[in-house]
């Protein structure tokens, strides 16, 4: 196996051990974690897709496994990144020949294997209403019980906001909702639209803590069912309405405030103008919009498309048709219709949030596998890898607050940021 490993990973010291299906172990015995190559099929998948997609397919199918800390195993990314682009294994023709010879020697050659059935197979025009609904269903209609186990009691699937080092995940999620409510200056009787409402966390907080009337929309049937039940149990059915509805089809404005939390990643670059146009149409003059979305570092190309890698693990297994945008581009597009008043990065907060979610998953691993089968492996890999990306600055997240000024130009915004910051009001 050593020649095969050398063909793929080169001669750099590996941060983990490799244990192969034939019982051989390669690498430092004292390494903190082990990547288990459980089957020759793992090699075959990597030969046909020498990047994160091949590795991801092998892990989801069980041809690769992790023994130990998944974060330690994912440090392999830094070894591979030095040799190619991200998780792409860079082999010249001589390297490819060596890899093929080594694979043949261990019986790992063959035709491409079919991808695991969990890989998304969407049809129709990209970001059409039907395809967007299918993409959302692929990601969110997994299992409400699974999401509750991973996300915790708040059922909040977006970046938390940790007020201090000792805050729990649930405290940080509630604090995040309060920060957003204060940025929107919610008060009793105001009408709030929450676009991509998930399981109802924001609308519940707005109604319970601020007396707002709220409409939450989602494309996930399972989310809507549970959100509606949570609203009923809270006794707030007279103040909160949950809908399965595309934001492009909302026609009962105006709303006094709009929040969009963790939904923006599903809006394609070509749809951003329509997205902000719809929200502008639905927002009353003087109303505020809070757009909370994952973003990417700038690359010097203003307005460039930023889809997840079409041949990447995230695109195929996690967020099909997902696209990230550089925050400057987002602000510029918002400025065409709104007045942007505040931008805040929560990058470190999302890294911490994801590590909490990974810990919840691993603490309940057997239950997770019972609930969603191999999809538990997808989530373990996706969340751990995402945490490392936020920590390394390869991914970020921003809350952008904007206002729709009145006809005379007045905005109703405060003279300083103190009223937007919850910690300064306590």
Image (spheres, helix red, strand yellow):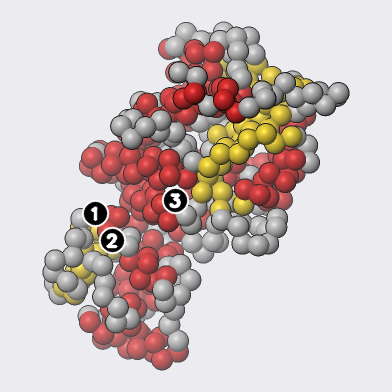
Residue 121 horizontal/vertical position (percent): 53, 54
**In the image, what residue occupies the spot 45% across and 67% down?**
86
Query: Which quarter of the figure is the C terminus placed in?
Result: top left
Query: Marks 1 and 2, how far apart in space?
Result: 7 Å
Residue 187 horizontal/vertical position (percent): 60, 13
**On the image, numbered disc 2 is attached to which residue?**
73
Label number found at residue 69 = 1
Please say if 37 is above or below 418.
below
Q: Is residue 217 left or right of residue 101?
A: right
Please say if 424 is above or below 371.
above
**In the image, what residue occupies the spot 41% across and 30% down?**
163
- Mark 2 Cα shell of 10 Å, populated few (<14), some (14-19), many (≥20): many
**In the image, what residue occupies the spot 39% across and 49% down?**
387
The quarter holding residue 333 reads: top right
State the count of labels.
3
Q: Who comes first in sequence, dot 3 or dot 2? A: 2
Q: Is residue 71 visible?
A: yes
Residue 208 horizontal/vertical position (percent): 49, 12
Q: Is residue 108 visible?
A: no
Q: Are marks 1 and 2 in contact (CB under 8 Å)?
A: yes
- Mark 1 Cα shell of 10 Å, populated few (<14), some (14-19), many (≥20): few
**On the image, numbered disc 3 is attached to which residue?**
390
As drawn, the residue found furthest toward the right would be 408
Label number found at residue 102 = none
**In the image, what residue occupies the spot 82% across and 26% down?**
409
Q: Is residue 189 left or right of residue 69?
A: right
Query: Marks 3 and 2, how far apart in space?
Result: 17 Å
Residue 34 horizontal/vertical position (percent): 21, 63
As drawn, the residue found furthest toward the bottom would be 94
Q: Are marks 3 and 1 in contact (CB under 8 Å)?
A: no
Regarding mark 3 in the picture, which secondary structure is present there? helix
């Amino acid at each position: 196996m050593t020649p095969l490993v050398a063909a793929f990973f080169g001669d750099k010291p590996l941060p983990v051990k490799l244990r192969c299906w034939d019982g051989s172990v390669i690498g430092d015995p004292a390494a903190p974690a082990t990547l288990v190559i459980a089957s020759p099929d793992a090699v075959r998948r990597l030969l046909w897709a020498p990047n994160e997609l091949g590795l991801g397919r092998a892990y989801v199918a069980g041809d690769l496994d992790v023994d130990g800390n998944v974060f330690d195993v994912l440090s392999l990314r830094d070894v591979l990144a030095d040799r190619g682009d991200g998780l792409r294994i860079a082999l010249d023709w001589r390297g490819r020949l060596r890899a093929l010879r080594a694979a043949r020697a261990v019986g790992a050659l063959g035709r491409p294997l079919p991808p695991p059935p969990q890989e998304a197979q969407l049809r129709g025009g990209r970001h059409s209403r039907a395809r967007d609904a299918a993409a959302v269903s692929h990601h969110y209609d997994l299992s409400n019980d699974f999401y509750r186990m991973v996300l915790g009691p708040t059922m909040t699937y977006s970046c938390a906001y940790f007020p201090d080092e000792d805050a729990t995940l649930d405290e940080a999620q509630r604090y995040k909702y309060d920060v957003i409510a204060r940025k929107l200056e919610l008060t009793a009787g105001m009408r709030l639209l929450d676009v991509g409402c998930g399981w109802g966390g924001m609308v519940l907080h707005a109604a319970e803590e601020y007396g707002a009337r709220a409409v939450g929309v989602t494309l996930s049937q399972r989310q809507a069912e549970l959100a509606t039940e949570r609203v009923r149990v809270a006794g707030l059915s007279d103040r909160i309405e949950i809908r399965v509805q595309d934001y492009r089809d909302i026609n009962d404005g105006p709303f006094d405030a709009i929040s969009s939390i963790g939904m923006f990643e599903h809006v394609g670059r070509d749809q951003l103008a329509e997205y902000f146009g719809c929200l502008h149409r639905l927002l009353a003059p003087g109303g505020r919009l809070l757009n909370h979305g994952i973003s990417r570092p700038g690359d010097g190309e203003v307005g460039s498309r930023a889809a997840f890698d079409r041949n990447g693990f995230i695109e195929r297994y996690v967020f099909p048709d997902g696209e990230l945008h550089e925050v400057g581009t987002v602000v510029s597009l918002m400025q065409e219709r709104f007045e942007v008043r505040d931008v805040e990065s929560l990058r470190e907060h999302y890294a911490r949030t994801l590590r909490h979610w990974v810990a919840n998953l691993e603490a309940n691993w057997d239950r997770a596998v019972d609930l969603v089968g191999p999809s538990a492996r997808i989530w373990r890999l996706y969340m751990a890898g995402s945490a490392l990306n936020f920590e390394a600055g390869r991914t970020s997240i921003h809350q952008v607050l904007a206002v729709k000024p009145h006809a005379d130009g007045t905005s109703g915004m405060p003279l300083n940021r103190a009223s937007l910051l919850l910690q300064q009001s306590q």
